[in-house]
């Protein structure tokens, strides 16, 4: 017993003597990747799929230990095509993970190398779009007119834009109000604002896959959550039932905005800040922040 402990200790010391700084870096990188993969997969369908794969691996190991030839042969044939099967089954999750990496600070850094500082006229254009949306949202809140307005950011929404009608117009409260007038042909879809311009309208958004949200949430709010889960867009929703103004971002809905707080929140999220201040945490000024399950029909 004592000899075994001494032998293990000597092996550990010999291993530590061969340890290099690059090995520490290697372990940290792998740990970081595994941690983020687990973080992405939590509370998604991917989590259940991973559990299923682990069960199959355990069954495969058991078939080898107990020499279950037929079962082992079936598993061997299955795992020969496992890489292709994983790519097909996990395609939505892999796409989401890659988009998440692209929206990270590293992705923003590389995109910042290709484009220099944003010009003053573009900032002015974005502010013009924000003011128009705030004005029309305030009007819709009083008249209880439904609206779904998507501010595109780094993640391009070309596939969503293809489902609607290209507008490519200067933003104004009157023009946005006409699009969402309940007799207008484009009022049921979403409006996409790109680079401060009303780029498309009548667009169809993917519904959220989150099954934990309230069943009372209408299609408009579910669509806003869906696109916010798949992109870095900021979405403004006006409820047709109650006139409540909400914002969806990163799979979370924040509600009960007023004209002032909506303007502050959109300015905080959409107007570029000074580079030295870009790492600070965004502040969302809506009331009742983070309430996903708040009931609100359409």
Image (cartoon, rainbow, N blue to C red):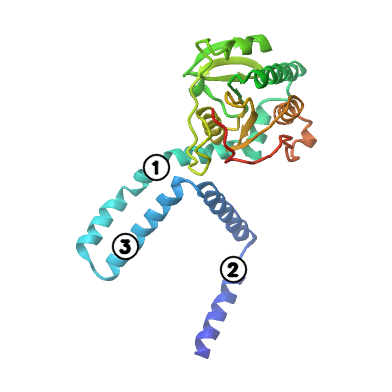
Q: Secondary structure at mark 2?
A: loop
Disc 1 designates what residue? 87
Pinpoint residue 142: horizontal percent, then vertical percent: 67, 20
Q: Nearer the viewer, mark 3 or mark 1?
A: 3
Depth order, front residue of 143/210: 143
Disc 2 designates what residue? 18
Q: Secondary structure at mark 3?
A: helix
Q: Is residue 152 above or below residue 29?
A: above
Q: Quadrant of the C terminus?
A: top right
- Disc marking residue 54: none
Q: In percent of the image, x 73 and y 40: which residue is there?
A: 281
Q: In percent of the image, x 68 and y 30: which residue is there?
A: 112
Q: Secondary structure at mark 1?
A: helix
Disc 3 designates what residue? 59
Q: Nearer the viewer, mark 2 or mark 1?
A: 1
Q: In percent of the image, x 48 and y 29: which residue is there?
A: 206
């Amino acid at each position: 017993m004592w000899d075994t402990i001494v032998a293990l200790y000597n092996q550990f010391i010999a291993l530590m003597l061969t340890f290099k700084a690059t090995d520490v870096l290697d372990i940290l990188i792998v740990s970081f990747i595994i941690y983020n993969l687990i973080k992405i997969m939590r509370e998604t369908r991917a989590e259940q799929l991973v559990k299923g794969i682990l069960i199959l691996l355990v069954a495969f190991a058991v078939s080898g230990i107990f020499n279950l030839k037929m079962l082992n042969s079936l598993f061997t044939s299955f795992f020969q095509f496992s890489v292709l099967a994983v790519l097909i089954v996990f395609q939505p999750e892999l796409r989401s993970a890659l988009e998440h990496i692209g929206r990270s600070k590293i992705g923003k850094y590389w995109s910042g190398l290709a484009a220099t500082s944003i010009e003053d006229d573009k900032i002015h254009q974005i502010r013009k779009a924000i003011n128009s949306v705030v004005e029309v949202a305030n009007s819709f809140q009083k008249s209880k007119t439904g609206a779904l307005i998507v501010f595109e950011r780094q993640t391009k929404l070309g596939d969503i834009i293809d489902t609607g009608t290209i507008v490519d117009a200067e933003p104004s409260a009157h023009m946005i109000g006409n699009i969402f007038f309940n007799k207008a042909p484009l009022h049921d879809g979403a409006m996409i604002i790109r680079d401060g311009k009303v780029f498309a309208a009548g667009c169809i958004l993917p519904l959220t896959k989150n099954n934990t949200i309230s069943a009372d949430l209408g299609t408009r709010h579910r669509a806003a959550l869906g696109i916010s889960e798949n992109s870095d867009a900021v979405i403004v929703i006006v409820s047709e039932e109650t006139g409540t103004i909400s914002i969806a971002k990163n799979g979370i809905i924040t509600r009960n905005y007023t004209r002032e707080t909506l303007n502050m929140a959109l300015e905080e999220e959409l107007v570029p800040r000074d580079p030295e201040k870009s790492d600070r945490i965004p502040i969302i000024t809506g009331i009742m922040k983070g309430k996903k399950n708040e009931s609100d029909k359409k």
